[in-house]
């Protein structure tokens, strides 16, 4: 190989092939029960790092209160970390040391929320819900309608559903509306927060398969938050296990689920039925 070959060679794969990389993420919530009461500090996340390639699915598991949703909200930009950085490909999204904070609307990261019932405004039509992000981004009405229709098609809903309201759908269909809202902005990364936990077991599988299907079609990297380690086996390539905001175990799914090392992971595995 000549020197000139070297100069035009792409950067090392470890650099270009990562869809998202995060390091040292920490978040403390400070709250008060009342104005006169003492401050309460909750360490929701402490020094969390992970990385993910395109088309890979990372499971974030842990019991209630372990910091899973907080991590998801930091990634999409609904919350600011106290320390750490997040990079999407080569682009810094957040870097606390250099005071970089990219607003959520500019990140190109979609989020499916924990509870489709409370995350879908009952007074908005499906097209208004799914198209909100596009409208914020200044996409015109005609193009918006086409992209909403395409997103609904991808999640198995119909164009006619656009003018209906959330209460006119089943739980599984409502989660499909939530997924359409997450993907309509054509994200390269999807954060799914307990995307199937609130659904009937029979519908869970359909929605999981839909997420796999969308991952394949769009080449998305998916961060799949769940307390159900049974789902992880079916869906995910890698796992991080959170306990009290800290990563206590990480690795490929087969390794973490097949031979967990940490007592906390063993406890999670024994507590949950497998699918
Ligand atoms: N806005 C907030 N203000 C104060 N404390 C918060 C806030 N959001 C989260 N917390 C606290 O941070 C910790 C982590 O919460 P988080 O919602 O991230 O957990 P989780 O793993 O998603 O739990 P679950 O499985 O119940 O959804 C909890 O102790 C929670 O009470
Ligand atoms: Mg949560």
Image (cartoon, rainbow, N blue to C red):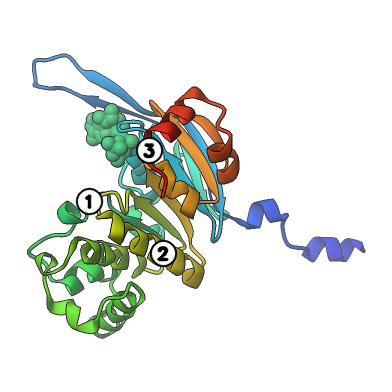
Is 259 drawn above or below residue 222 in the view shown?
Answer: above
Q: How many marks?
A: 3
Q: Is residue 69 above or below residue 126?
A: above
For mark 1, give the secondary structure: loop
Instruction: Choose between 207 and 11: the one closer to the eye.
Output: 207
Looking at the rendering, which quadrant does residue 157 occupy?
Answer: bottom left
Few, some or many residues within 10 Å of mark 1 (<14, 14–19, 20+): some
Q: Which mark is residue 115?
A: 1
For disc 3, the marked residue is 272
Whether residue 19 sits left or right of residue 32 in the image: it is: right
Nearer to us: label 1 or label 2: 2
For the residues carrying marks 2 and 3, which lies nearer the camera in this image?
3
Circle 3 SS class? loop
**Relative image position of residue 77 (x, y in whole percent):** 35, 48
Image quarter for residue 245?
top left
Q: Residue at x 8, y 15 (%)?
A: 36
Q: CA distance from mark 1 to mark 2?
A: 19 Å
Residue 207, quarter of picture:
bottom left
Q: Earlier in the sequence, mark 3 or mark 1?
A: 1
Residue 80 at least partly seen: no
Residue 271 in view here: yes
List x then y, in percent, for residue 205: 36, 60
Q: In the image, what residue occupies the spot 25% across and 55% down?
A: 200
Q: Position of residue 212 (x, y in %)?
A: 45, 63
Q: Nearer the viewer, residue 267 or 104?
A: 267
Label 2 crowd bin: few (<14), some (14–19), many (20+), radius 10 Å: few
Residue 96 left/right relative to 133: right
Q: Residue at x 36, y 75 (%)?
A: 154
Task: Tell us which disc is closer to us: 3 or 1.
Answer: 3
Q: Which residue is mark 2?
A: 209
Q: Position of residue 244 (x, y in %)?
A: 38, 25
Q: Is residue 79 left or right of residue 83?
A: left
């Amino acid at each position: 190989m000549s020197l000139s070959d070297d100069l035009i060679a792409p950067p090392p794969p470890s650099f270009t092939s990562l869809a998202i990389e995060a390091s040292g993420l920490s978040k403390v919530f400070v709250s008060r029960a009342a104005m006169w009461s003492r401050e309460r500090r909750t360490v929701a996340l402490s020094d969390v790092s992970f990385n993910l390639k395109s088309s890979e699915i990372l499971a974030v598991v842990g019991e209630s209160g372990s910091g899973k949703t907080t991590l998801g909200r930091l990634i999409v930009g609904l919350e600011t970390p106290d320390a750490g950085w997040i990079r999407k490909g080569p682009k810094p999204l957040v870097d606390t040391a250099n005071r970089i904070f990219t607003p959520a609307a500019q990140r190109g990261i979609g989020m499916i929320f924990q509870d489709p019932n409370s995350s879908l405004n009952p007074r908005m039509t499906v097209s208004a819900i799914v198209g909100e992000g596009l409208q914020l981004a200044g996409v015109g009405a005609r193009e918006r309608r086409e992209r909403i229709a395409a997103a609904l098609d991808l999640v198995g809903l119909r164009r006619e559903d656009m003018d209906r309201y959330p209460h006119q759908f089943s739980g599984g269909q409502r989660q499909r509306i939530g997924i359409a809202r997450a993907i309509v902005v054509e994200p390269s990364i999807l954060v799914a927060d307990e995307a199937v936990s609130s659904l009937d077991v029979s519908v869970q599988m359909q929605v999981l398969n839909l997420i796999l299907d969308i991952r394949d079609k769009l080449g998305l990297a998916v961060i799949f938050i769940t307390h159900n380690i049974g789902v992880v086996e079916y869906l995910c390539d890698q796992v991080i296990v959170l306990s009290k905001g800290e990563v206590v175990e990480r690795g490929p799914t087969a390794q973490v689920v097949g031979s967990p090392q940490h007592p906390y992971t063993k406890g999670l595995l024994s507590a949950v039925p497998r699918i």
